[in-house]
């Protein structure tokens, strides 16, 4: 693959199932927090699906648009945009009322030392949004961090696994879920809470973190010795498909890769792909932050892109010095501090 556009074409191609689902969906789609890691590609995928469906639905993205050029990029792709700080109530209230809402807003990195802002974004803001969009259906992005570490041989936490979040980021994310659940029951708002870990593309993700460390001759920390990963295109598609699964009370759905990947094996594979010797640190534990996504696969089918394919794309990108978001996942953290 010669450039980022070639790779992202893989990301932006909707399946026939997604095109059909978007065609059947009543109303437009609003993405709150479109400026984050997944928002731009999610918006573009939804727009591609709409275009292929032959319908005239709109995709509207809301963000502060602090990243230079992102708003223009989205508008050139046919996505309408609204600039707003969701924590400012007057700006939130001024947003259009839309039937379908995908909620991507939140904060993770920089939590330590800025805990109050983390709780405001992750636990206070959801209540304001749930009130504003009480007559919509809402897919709420959450995280597998709300679960505790589980034994590697257990296959990951299912949706029935009781939450036991470690650290203020994960605790505030459980707060997000509970607030949305409350308003779902109060207003009979159909919702789906989308517990994701970990989405990857060539510009960010666990696989990129490992590949960059291998390329830079840095030791790979084995403390969190196993991980789930999923291609961002698959995660985006299932998020859009989740709109039709929104329910009252709110439905919980895990989304993660089908394989439990061993970090040592991933690093050694990157060593082969990049032609580098691999160094390790730390001791591999018998438990890890892992999720079981079999219910999502039952509803939507298996992911279309395997982890090995993503690894090949990432290795190629790193070898060519491709641009990254420079947002490490800190997947190796076992204490919940980010």
Image (cartoon, grey):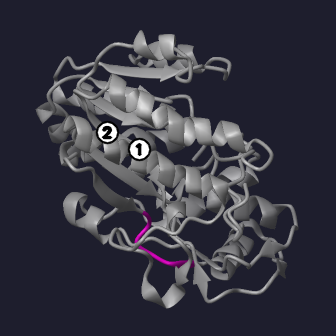
The residue at the point 45 percent across, 36 percent down is: 126
Q: Is residue 188 rendered to the left or right of residue 112? A: left
Q: Nearer the viewer, residue 234 or 289?
A: 289
The residue at the point 42 percent across, 36 percent down is: 103
Which residue is tagged 2?
183
Which residue is tagged 1?
179
Q: Is residue 207 rendered to the left or right of residue 215? A: left
Q: Please report contact status of discs 1 and 2: CB closer than 8 Å, yes or no.
A: yes
**How many C-alpha atoms fall within 10 Å of the one at disc 2: few (<14), some, or many (≥20)?**
many
Give the magenta range.
Answer: 256-261
The residue at the point 42 percent across, 49 percent down is: 177
Please identify the quarter of the rendering in which residue 101 is found.
top left
Q: What percent of the width, then of the height, locates residue 285?
A: 67, 86
The residue at the point 17 percent across, 29 percent down is: 53
Tally the marks: 2
**Whole-Å distance between the Cαs marked 1 and 2?**
6 Å
- Residue sitting farthest toward the left: 24
Vertical relation: 106 (above or below) 154: above
Q: Nearer the viewer, residue 123 or 238?
A: 123
Task: Look at the magenta stretch and give its main secondary structure.
Answer: loop
* Kind of element beneath mark 2: helix
Residue 21 disc label: none
């Amino acid at each position: 693959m010669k450039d980022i556009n070639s790779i992202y074409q893989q990301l932006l191609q909707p399946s026939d199932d997604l095109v059909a689902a978007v065609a059947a969906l009543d109303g437009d789609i609003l993405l709150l927090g479109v400026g984050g890691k997944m928002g731009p590609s999610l918006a573009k995928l939804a727009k591609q699906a709409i275009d292929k469906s032959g319908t005239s639905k709109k995709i509207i993205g809301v963000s502060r648009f602090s990243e230079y050029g992102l708003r223009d990029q989205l508008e050139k792709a046919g996505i309408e945009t609204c600039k707003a700080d969701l924590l400012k109530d007057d700006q939130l209230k001024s947003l259009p009322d839309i039937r379908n809402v995908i909620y991507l807003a939140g904060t993770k990195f920089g939590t330590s030392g800025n805990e109050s802002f983390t709780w405001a974004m992750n636990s206070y803001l959801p209540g304001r949004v749930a009130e504003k969009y009480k007559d919509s259906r809402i897919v709420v992005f959450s995280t597998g961090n709300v679960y505790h570490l589980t034994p590697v041989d257990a296959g990951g936490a299912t949706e029935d696994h009781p939450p036991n979040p470690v650290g203020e980021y994960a605790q505030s994310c459980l707060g997000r879920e509970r607030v949305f659940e409350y308003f779902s029951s109060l207003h009979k708002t159909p919702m789906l809470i989308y517990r994701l870990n970990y989405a990857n593309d060539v510009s960010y993700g666990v696989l990129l973190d490992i590949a960059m460390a291998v390329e830079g001759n840095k030791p790979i920390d084995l403390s969190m010795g196993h991980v789930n990963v999923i291609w961002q295109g698959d995660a985006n598609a299932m998020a859009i498909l989740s709109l039709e699964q929104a329910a009252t009370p709110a439905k919980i759905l895990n989304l993660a890769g089908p394989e439990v990947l061993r970090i040592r094996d991933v690093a050694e594979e990157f060593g082969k792909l990049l032609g580098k010797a691999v160094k390790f640190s730390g001791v591999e534990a018998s438990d890890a932050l892992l999720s079981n996504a079999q219910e999502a696969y039952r509803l939507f089918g298996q992911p279309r892109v395997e982890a090995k394919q993503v690894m090949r794309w990432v290795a190629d990108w790193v070898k060519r010095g491709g641009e990254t978001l420079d947002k490490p996942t800190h997947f190796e953290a076992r204490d919940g501090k980010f």
